[in-house]
Image: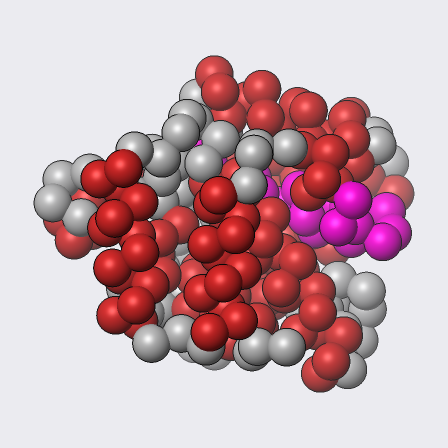
């Protein structure tokens, strides 16, 4: 197994925790602009992915840091913390409300959201990466030109062969939310896979909305939990 957790951290970039455990975020628009510059004015896959397309993020070898100061939080911790917070609020019956400022990000180390066991954490990260690649192409097919650019960048990144093969295989696979939903092994993981997918797309796009709706249905997520996940994701932007 390749080092999926390290790659996931690079995909999302290092998120800076603001003073007091808050997150500040540059947002998809600012991050997307950098990716578009790197890709000659085009986003690689999904026009609203965190850095303007999943491959655009990969190409930056760590993306761009979000605003804030203090301890750095990797991609696995970001997704795990977001899903954990949404899941806990949903279980506690809290109302879905907009965060009044930068969201406090919990670190659920040792839970199913962020396993402390290295092998388990790596396995979960690989599945989250697979979900993100699938979601990033939800807004349409990848053109031949885009795929050529992606393949070139994958080669230039010097990724482990298994990592490149996984990304390429997912890019070539038909878009199938049922197959991605099958990656979840528990309700908590289902929430986390949805969170990872949500962060990889422009959730306001018609095609992306349709994909996320189908994914939520296949994952058998409660609508209330889905609403909490969207609210927490919005709080990062």
Q: Which scheme is used to colour this image of the protein?
A: secondary structure
Residue at 18 percent across and 48 percent down: it is 39
Up/down of 144 relative to 151, above or below: above
Q: At x 30% / y 33%, what residue is drawn?
A: 143
Residue at the image point whose x is 50% and y is 68% from the top: 163
In front of the other: 67 or 54: 54
* Horizontal side, residue 31 vs residue 82: left or right: left
Is 219 or 72 nearer to us in this picture?
219
Residue 46 colored in magenta in the image? no
Q: Give how far across and how far down residue 60 sits, in percent.
A: 27, 64
The quarter of the rendered structure image containing the N terminus is: bottom right
Work out whether residue 9 or residue 179 is closer to the camera in this orientation and state it: 179
- x 47%, y 16%: residue: 206
Left or right: 144, with 5 as reference point: left
Residue 22 seen in the figure: no
Left or right: 69 as drawn, with respect to 163: left
Q: Quadrant of residue 28?
A: top left
- Which residues make up the magenta segment? 182-202
What is the residue that sits farthest to the top in this orientation?
206
- Residue 71: percent from the left, percent from the top? 47, 78
Secondary structure, magenta segment, majority class:
helix
Q: Is residue 40 visible?
A: yes
186 within the magenta span = yes
Position of residue 42 measured from the top left corner of the image (x, y, whole percent): 20, 38
């Amino acid at each position: 197994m390749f080092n999926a957790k390290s790659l996931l951290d690079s995909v999302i970039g290092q998120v800076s925790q603001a003073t007091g455990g808050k997150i500040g975020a540059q947002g998809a628009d600012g991050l997307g602009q950098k990716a578009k510059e790197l890709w000659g004015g085009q986003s690689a896959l999904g026009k609203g992915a965190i850095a303007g397309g999943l491959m655009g993020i990969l190409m930056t070898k760590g993306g761009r840091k979000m605003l804030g100061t203090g301890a750095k939080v990797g991609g696995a911790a970001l997704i795990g913390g977001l899903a954990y917070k949404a899941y806990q609020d949903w279980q506690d019956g809290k109302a879905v409300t907009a965060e009044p400022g930068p969201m406090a990000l919990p670190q659920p180390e040792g839970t199913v959201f962020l396993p402390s066991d290295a092998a388990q954490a790596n396995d979960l990260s690989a599945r989250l990466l697979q979900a993100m690649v699938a979601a990033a192409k939800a807004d349409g097919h990848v053109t031949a030109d885009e795929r050529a650019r992606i393949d070139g960048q994958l080669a230039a990144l010097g990724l482990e062969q298994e990592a490149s093969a996984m990304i390429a295989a997912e890019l070539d696979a038909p878009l199938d939310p049922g197959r991605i939903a099958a990656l979840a092994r528990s309700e908590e993981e289902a929430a986390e896979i949805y969170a990872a997918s949500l962060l990889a797309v422009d959730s306001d796009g018609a095609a992306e909305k349709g994909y996320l709706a189908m994914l939520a249905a296949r994952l058998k997520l409660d609508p209330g939990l889905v609403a909490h996940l969207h609210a927490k994701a919005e709080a990062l932007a």
